[in-house]
Amino acid sequence: MLFTQLEYFVAVAREKHFGRAAAASFVSASALSESIRKLEIELGVPLVRRGRSFQGLTPEGEAVLVWARRMIADHQALKDEVTSASGRLNGVVRVGVIPSGVALAARVLAELCATHPELQVRLITGLTSEQVISGLRSFELDAGLLHPSAATDDIRHILVETDRLVVVGAATRSDLGDTMDASRLEQMPVCVLEPGMRGRQILDDALAGLGIRLRPRVEVDSVEALLALARTGEWVSVVPASAVPKAAASIGVKVAEIVPVDVALPIILATLGEEPRPPLSLAVDAAARRLAARS
C-alpha cells in the first residue's frame, strides 16, 4: 500500500469527482483511477461506487476513509516533528473559522507566523462550529476558532476571546446613535448571519429573552458581507465588535451598542485532543495562548 494511493482516494472522497480529484493531485484521471483500483485489489473490497461518474463511497470505502485520513495526518505530523526538532517548522497549517472569528483568527495567525516564518497558512472561513469540529475530526483542519457550546470531549480548547455583538450602519445614517435599544431591531432593515450559525443563534436567544423576534431583511454567511451591506446605507447589520476597526469611519460605518442586553460572543481555539499532538496544532495553540495572555 502506497501513501499516494491513500492520498488519491481521500482526494476523490473530498472532491466527489475523479477529474477534479486528479487535477487537485496533479495526475491524470486515468492514473488516479488505476491507483485506487490497485488499492481496492490489495484490500479486497470495492471502495468507490463507479458509474458514468463518481457515485459515492461503498460502506467499506467510508470505513477506509477514516483510516486513510488518519494515516496521512500521522505521516505529515511525523515529518513536521522532524523539522520542528531541527529548530524550524514549515508546511501548511489549516485553520477553520466561524464568521465571527475571522478578525481574531487574523491576530492568532499573525502571532503564529511571527514565531514560525516558514509556515504557510490556509484559512477556511464561513464555517459553522459543527463544520470546524468535523474538519478537526477528519484531520482536514489543524485548528479552528468556534463557539464553545459546540466543543466535545475529544476536542482540546482554550477561551481566546469574549467578543460582543453590535449594530453597524453607514456613517451617514441619522437614525443610528451610540446605542440602540434592542426593540428597534424589529422595525429596522437588519442584516444578520444565517440561522444555522451559532452567532445568529446567540443573538436570537438574547433577543427572545426580551420578547423580541428578529425579522431580518438579509441573511448571509460572512461578517465581511454584513459590513459591505451596512456600508450601502440601505441596511444595518449585527456584527462582532472585533470585526469593526476602532476608527469605524475609516470604512464608512458607525457603531451602536445594543442595549439593554450585552450579547456576549465567546470564541475558543480548538484542536483535536488525541496524543501525541501534531506540531502544527501545538504551534497554533501556543500562539493563541500568547495572544490571550497579553489581552
Image (tube, helix red, strand yellow):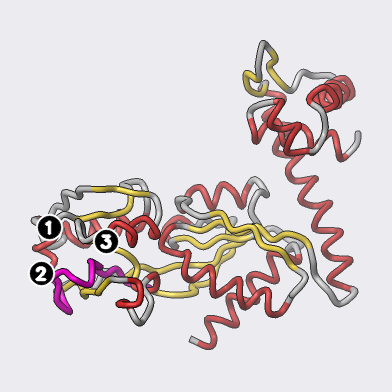
Residue flagged by tag 1: what amino acid is it?
Met
Against 259, is 37 above or below?
above
Residue 199 is left or right of residue 72, and the answer is left
Quadrant of the rendered image containing residue 233: bottom left
Please give the residue where the numbered disc 3 appears in the rendered image.
230
Closest to the observer, 67 or 79: 79
Percent of width and height locating residue 2 = 90, 36
Please give the residue where the numbered disc 1 appears in the rendered image.
188
Residue flagged by tag 2: what amino acid is it?
Asp
Residue 264 is left or right of residue 92, and the answer is left
Residue at image position (39%, 73%) is 242
Residue at image position (49%, 71%) is 104
Label 2 secondary element: loop
* Inter-mark Cα distance, 1 to 3: 12 Å
Residue flagged by tag 3: what amino acid is it?
Ala
Please give the residue where the numbered disc 2 appears in the rendered image.
175
Residue at image position (86%, 38%) is 4
* Inter-mark Cα distance, 1 to 2: 10 Å
- Mark 1 or 3, closer to the camera: 3
Q: How many marks?
A: 3
Label 1 secondary element: loop
Percent of width and height locating residue 260 = 14, 74
Label 3 secondary element: helix
- Choose the circle earlier in sequence order: 1 or 3: 1
* Inter-mark Cα distance, 2 to 3: 13 Å
The quadrant in which the N terminus is found is top right
Residue extending farthest to the bottom is 294
Tag 1–tag 2 contact (CB < 8 Å) = yes
Residue 272 is left or right of residue 187, and the answer is right
Where are the magenta residues, as a range?
A: 163-181
